[in-house]
Image: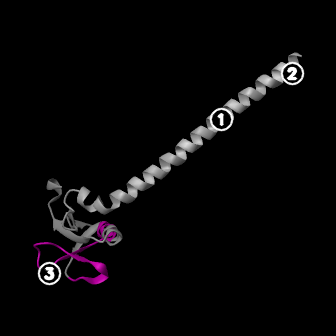
Amino acid sequence: MKKLIAILLTLVMVMGLAACVTVSTDEKKEEIQTDAAEEAAGEASDAAAIPGLEDGVLTISMECAYAPYNWTQYDDSNGAVPIKDAAGEYVNGYDVMIAKKICEANGWELEVVRSDWDSL
C-alpha cells in the first residue's frame, strides 16, 4: 500500500511539473511572437529613432592619422571615403571599412569628419 501511494504521489508530481513546463513553453512562444511583431513594426522607424540619422547620413568623426585603423590619403583608391571640408583628402582603414559595411547594410550614406584626438 505504501508503494502504491508513493507511486501515485510521484505521478502527481511529474504531471504537475509537466504542466508547468507546458505553460512556460506556451508563454515563451507567445513572448517570442510578440517580440517579433514589435520588431517588425519598429524597423520602419529605426533610422528616425537614432539621433543624427534622420537624413540618412551616418556622420563619424576620427583623427584620420591612426593607421591601421584610419589614415589620410590623397586619392580614393581601395575604397577610401572623402573627408568632409578637406578638399582632395580621403580617409581609409579598418574603422572606415566597418562604417561602410554598416552604412551599406542600412542604406545610409557615410560622412567622415576630421577631429583632433583630444576633441573626440
Q: Is residue 61 left or right of residue 23?
A: left
Going by the numbered disc 1, the residue's amino acid type is: Ala
The stretch drawn in magenta includes residue 61: no
Q: Earlier in the sequence, mark 3 or mark 2?
A: 2
Point out residue 34 in the picture as x, y percentages from the top left corner.
Answer: 44, 50
Between tags 3 and 1, which lies in front? Answer: 1
> Can residue 67 be seen at all in this image of the molecule?
no
Q: SS of the residue at dot 3?
A: loop
Q: Nearer the viewer, residue 73 or 81?
A: 81
Cα gap from disc 3 to disc 2, whole angstroms: 89 Å
Q: Nearer the viewer, residue 38 or 67?
A: 38
Q: Earlier in the sequence, mark 3 or mark 1?
A: 1
> Can residue 44 be seen at all in this image of the molecule?
yes
Q: Which residue is mark 1?
A: 19
Q: Which residue is mark 3?
A: 88
Point out residue 59 in the picture as x, y percentages from the top left corner.
Answer: 20, 65
The stretch drawn in magenta includes residue 77: yes
Residue at image point 20% right, 69% down: 112
Q: Residues within 10 Å of mark 1 (few under 14, many from 20)?
A: few
Residue 81: quarter of image = bottom left
Residue at image point 49% right, 50% down: 32
Going by the numbered disc 3, the residue's amino acid type is: Gly
Q: Quadrant of the N terminus?
A: top right
Between tags 3 and 2, which lies in front? Answer: 2
